Amino acid sequence: MPDGYDASEDERVLASLRGDGGPGPMPDTMRASVRAAFAARRSDSVFADVHEDGVDSPRGDLRDGESPLGAPRYVWLRAPGVEVRLEITAIDGQRDIVGQIDPAEAATVEVRCPYRVTRHDIDANGAFVARGVPKGPVSLLFQRTSEPSVTTRWIAI
């Protein structure tokens, strides 16, 4: 440390950056979101991890890191005995998700975002569509009829 270093000066600067000397109470909206996230977790769920993501392996004719505007992103998730394929398309600052679960034994899918959850029907082929999903983190929860539910890890869309 330099001569004359005073750690209390650092703390004073940090306190002024925080605005009131500390982080303060958690906002009610944040508290409600945390409670909803905790309540939404399912101990009986099987987790589907990302197996392949188009962001990680772009098409060969694109330069690294570039993707054409409007080009869909493809994500493939796997859990023991289950595969989920997603096509994510950006439209006007939101995302449309077209997906399919295999085997097709799920009745509904919950699309979970930090501030909302929407439910969508799954057809006999395991396909579903979720339109107008906000940009940001998302997790899917597939409610299956005879097997444990399948939950995806949070992915940024």
Image (cartoon, rainbow, N blue to C red):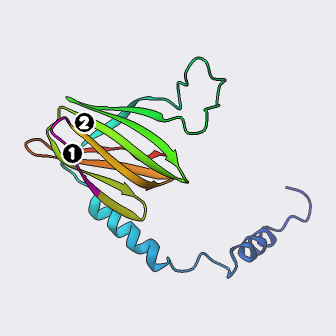
Q: Residue furthest top?
A: 60
Q: Which residues are magenta?
A: 119-125
Q: Is residue 120 above or below residue 17?
A: above
Residues at circles 1 and 2 in contact by the CB criterion of under 8 Å: yes
Residue at screen point 32% across, 39% down: 99
Residue at screen point 61% across, 18% down: 61
Q: Is residue 153 left or right of residue 125?
A: right
Q: Secondary structure at mark 2?
A: strand
Q: Label 1, on which residue?
A: 122
Quarter the N terminus occupies = bottom right
The quarter of the picture where residue 5 lies is: bottom right
Q: Is residue 109 left or right of residue 17?
A: left
Give the percent coordinates (x, y) of residue 147: 11, 41
Give the percent coordinates (x, y) of residue 85: 33, 33
Q: Is residue 148 above or below residue 37?
A: above
Distance (Cα) linking label 1 and label 2: 9 Å
Disc number for residue 101: 2
Q: Secondary structure at mark 1?
A: loop
The quarter of the picture where residue 11 lies is: bottom right
Give the percent coordinates (x, y) of residue 157: 49, 46
* Amino acid residing under circle 2: Ile
Mark closest to the chain's N terminus, 1 or 2: 2
Disc number for residue 3: none
Residue 45 part of the magenta-drawn span: no
Number of other residues with Cα within 10 Å of mark 2, as a class: few under 14, some 14 to 19, many 20 or more: many
